[in-house]
Amino acid sequence: MTLLALNAGSTSTKLALYERDLHQLWSASVSGLASPNARLLTREPGGDADTQELGPLQFRSATELLLGELALRWPTLQIEAVGHRVVHGGDLPVDSVTIDAPTLAAITHWSSLAPLHQHLNVAAINAARQAFPGALHVACFDTGFHRTLPARASLVAVPERFRSLGVRRYGFHGLSYESVLQQLAASGEPVFSERVIAAHLGGGSSLCAIAQGRSVETSMGVTPLSGVPMTTRCGDLDPGALLFLLQSGETDVRQLQAALYEESGLKALTGTSGDMKLLLDISAHSSEARKAVDYFCYQVRRHMGALAAAMEGVDRIVFTGGIGANAAFVRQAVCDGLRFLGVELDAKANLANASSVHTSHSGIKVNVLETDEESILARKAAAHVDGSGGH
């Protein structure tokens, strides 16, 4: 009997197969969805990834492709449980839950607060339930890790009639934050007694203040649109600007939503692309790319300062996500502006994307980690099989 983790995102879909003891057997992913250059990567544990160019591919076809690859490689597979990443858990009081009809209806209800992701999560759930009807299917919420936010961090100062509809700060990327905490703890680091700022920087980016293993503040709020600027999402924006745009007659709600989620962020600043790797590659001869990268690093640094203030100090900074784990220039630019806190990077270690990139004299430890959301999904699914999940 095995466990399956299915991580459906807006630009990639990942799948990982585990034995019951959480030993990974195989993984596969499709990246570059809705672009001209989607790619299929499959990997045996400890081996190199096999890559296949797919051309343009949409989300539903990618999910079907991954499930088909799984069936082809493991034709007699028996899946005991499937852990599904679900971006928005709304007001559900748990970090994970077994999926039944009422739960799926609740997940669907919150789609308007995560329009880039939630409908894809639901589509992946439906596809996997059809492929594995006898398995236990478990929804694992990105918002679940932030259920520990104190009232002063989760409240939104709007009329109660709006708050009663669910308008509050939720926070996201919780599965990633759980992953980095568990990785550091497994390596012997005392993260559950520290004040940690974790930065998940990628196509979607957020930061989280974690005190003694609990989320106490975060950059994202009601939706995954707020916080630092992202590849195509605007980040923090004065709500008065939205009222102005709607009243101007130049846009309507549907067009505005598409613009803020899909046409803003770094893409809007350059006018061409929000891909950080590309922007770093062309920044030597593109002033627009340099300005966009500088803006991103500044906003990350600004949010880190706010999170440090929320915890009255910081002991460790962790970079993860596609940008956080791979863009040495971004880490250096962010940390150079945090020297007043005592941060000092080892330039050589940082360029090598080492797991620890601070000097021996640094007053704050700085780590670089690849996030592993799939192992968290599998762990939560296993807990529901054992009857201990959904805390």
Image (tube, rainbow, N blue to C red):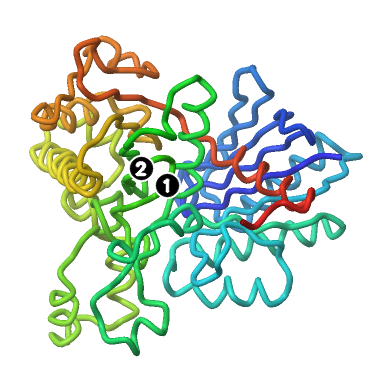
Coordinates of residue 331 in the picture (x, y in percent): 24, 29
Where is mark 2, residue-wise? 211
Image quadrant of residue 159?
Answer: bottom left
Report helix, strand or loop for mark 1.
Answer: strand
Q: Nearer the viewer, residue 287 or 240?
A: 240
Residue at point 43%, 50% (across, down)? 173
* 10 Å crowding of disc 1: few (<14), some (14-19), many (20+): some
Looking at the image, is 18 positioned above or below residue 120?
above
Looking at the image, is 167 positioned above or below residue 333?
below
Residue at point 37%, 60% (across, down)? 224
Image quadrant of residue 342?
Answer: top left
Disc 2 marks a residue whose amino acid type is Ala
Q: Is residue 173 shown left or right of residue 84? A: left
Q: Is residue 215 shown left or right of residue 364? A: right
Residue at point 30%, 39% (across, down)? 197
Could you tell me if the residues under marks 2 and 1 are in contact, i.e. CB atoms within 8 Å?
yes
Where is mark 1, residue-wise? 214
Quadrant (top left, top right, bottom left, bottom right) of the N terminus: top right
Coordinates of residue 201 in the picture (x, y in percent): 33, 41
Coordinates of residue 31 in the picture (x, y in percent): 51, 42
Q: Nearer the viewer, residue 19 or 146?
A: 146
Report helix, strand or loop for mark 2.
Answer: strand
Q: Answer yes or no: is residue 292 visible.
A: no
Per the model, the C-alpha gap separating discs 2 and 1 is 5 Å
Disc 1 marks a residue whose amino acid type is Arg
